[in-house]
Image (cartoon, grey):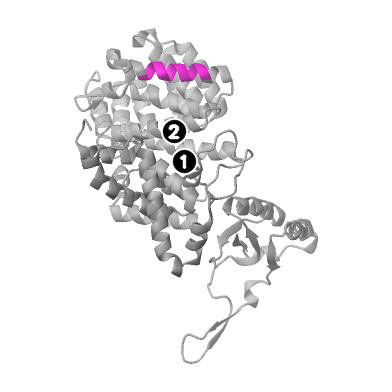
Amino acid sequence: MGEQPLLAVERIYREEYGRIVASLVRRFGDLDVAEDAAAEALLVALERWPTDGVPPNPGGWLTTTARNRAIDRLRRESHRDAKHQAALTMHDDTPHEPTGPVEDDRLRLIFACCHPALAPEARVALTLRLLGGLTVAEVAQAFLVAETTMAQRITRAKRKIKDAAIPFRVPTADDLPTRIEAVLAVVYLVFNEGYLSSSADADPVRAELTGEAIRLGRILRGLLPEEPEVAGLLALMLLTESRRTVRVAGGELVSLHEQDRGGWDRALIAEGHALVRECLAINRPGQYQLLAAINAVHTAAPEASATDWSQIAALYAQLYAVVPSPVVALNRAVVTAELDGPEVALAEVDRLGLTTYHAWHATRADLLRRLGRSAEARAAYDDAIAATDNVAERAYLARRRGSLAP
Amino acid sequence: MTQYLFSVHHGSEAYDRTPEEMQPSWDATGRFNDKAVAAGVFVFAGGLQPAETATTVDARGEAPIITDGPYLETKEWIGGFWVLDLPDLDTALRWATEASAACGEAVEVRPFHGD
């Protein structure tokens, strides 16, 4: 082990956690049994690996160890629990079900975690805990709630899965499109919370969350290679992540126009562009693919002035046809400003009236600034600052406000 | 298998409708019941008289207290329900979708205790 032995165990455990738990859930049909056994396997690894070395297939080793521990425990308890006894005698899990081209335990698990019968905040928490291998404390930290609150939320969700018999199964073809949507929404939510933290108490950009979302995105991509929206979401996250390190400078958010493009991560961009090309070839566009394509156009421009705005406008028109939301319209208006000027764009923006949304005020402020309407721009900057808690965004807006002509 | 309670909640206005108005949903509900019986998932179903016909008995104290009216004073109460025996929640939600379309009301799905 090159790194510190105990850290290596923790890292491998986290990486393998989703796989271990998912495999045990299939075997024993019970989340608590699976999680307890996985935790026991970690203790064994922490004891043995530093002296014996990491086994050649650490994930397989952890899964086998956890499975044996679960069987031992169930045997001990079986005299007082007929249900567990049934689980023991069940040789290899449930009858083989046709679950489409790919079957993976983690896929079954993520569909259970993101089940529409669970509250959205519980879906995100469960996914990070069970698939991402984050501890309850880490999940609590990610959402800035007390650990006991998060523990209750997760426990309640797990109890509902058990008592209401939410299945660990890939949904049928009929249900798949809407159910995938819920899974992708959870992953994108995790990413966005990392990319622009909504809290004043957290770092403005939280790489641990964007990294986790991308990791989940890669797992989904591996499991559902035929679904273009899955590829689209991964591409979108990669292309966004490629700009992360230059997105904040001196504690201040840096706009796309002003970013040092030399600091963009070329490997992530190349991977994202390849995925976008793959999506184009499949030709079943959806919102994540279109957002990815827009980001592909941005990241293809060597400098801001070289941006192909007319292509971006065409993509936004397509996106608006798929998702006719005011937020999409707002972003489209930003493109209008580049093509038709700030006056036309401002009329579009004002029609939207998203008065509680920080980006609406910030967009108005910028358009008013460009039109030389300083007093109105100043008021709009004030409204934008009041509507966001992200420290880097507030700093950026305050500087722009300060640089207005009198 | 898990037994699920499919309950239909509505207010008193549901009882003000004429039989002619109600007939289509009665027919659809009948067809839904037949389908559930044929599928072998039907346990029980029934429609209830309005809540003002309810009587509440509380025998927690020394002498039972009998009160006219439902336990909770609410604007909406259970107007009818099904009990179906189904393999999992996904299946239950599909049946509930049909049940809701048939009776023309929202349907709450709730599992019974197992064992």
Q: How many marks?
A: 2
User: For the point 39% across and 21% down, which residue is it?
Assistant: A239
Tell me the kind of residue under disc 2: Ile
Residue position for label 2 = A219
Percent across and percent down for residue A4 are 19, 36
Q: Is residue A122 above or below residue A275?
A: below
- Is residue A84 visible in the rendered structure shown here? yes
For mark 1, name the chain: A
**Which quarter of the image is occupied by the C terminus of chain A?**
top left
Q: CA distance from mark 2 to mark 1?
A: 9 Å
The question of residue A25 being in magenta is answered with no
Assign a secondary structure to mark 2.
helix
Q: Quadrant of residue A350?
A: top left
Crowd band around label 1 with a 10 angstrom C-alpha radius: few (<14), some (14–19), many (20+): many
Mark number, residue A16: none
Chain label for disc 2 = A
> Do the numbered discs 2 and 1 sit on residues whose CB atoms are within 8 Å?
yes
In the rendered structure, which segment of residues is drawn in magenta?
A268-278
Tell me: A399 left or right of B49: left
On screen, residue A168 above or below B110: above
* Residue position marked by numbered label 1 in the rendering: A106
From where the camera sits, is residue A131 visible? Answer: no
- Of all residues, the one furthest to the bottom in this rendering is B63
As rendered, which of A7 and A369 lies closer to the eye? A7
Is the residue at mark 2 from the same chain as the one at mark 1? Answer: yes
Quarter-wise, where is residue B41 in the image?
Answer: bottom right
- Point out the image quarter for the N terminus of chain A: top left
Q: Give the residue type at disc 1.
A: Arg
Which is more N-terminal, label 1 or label 2?
Answer: 1
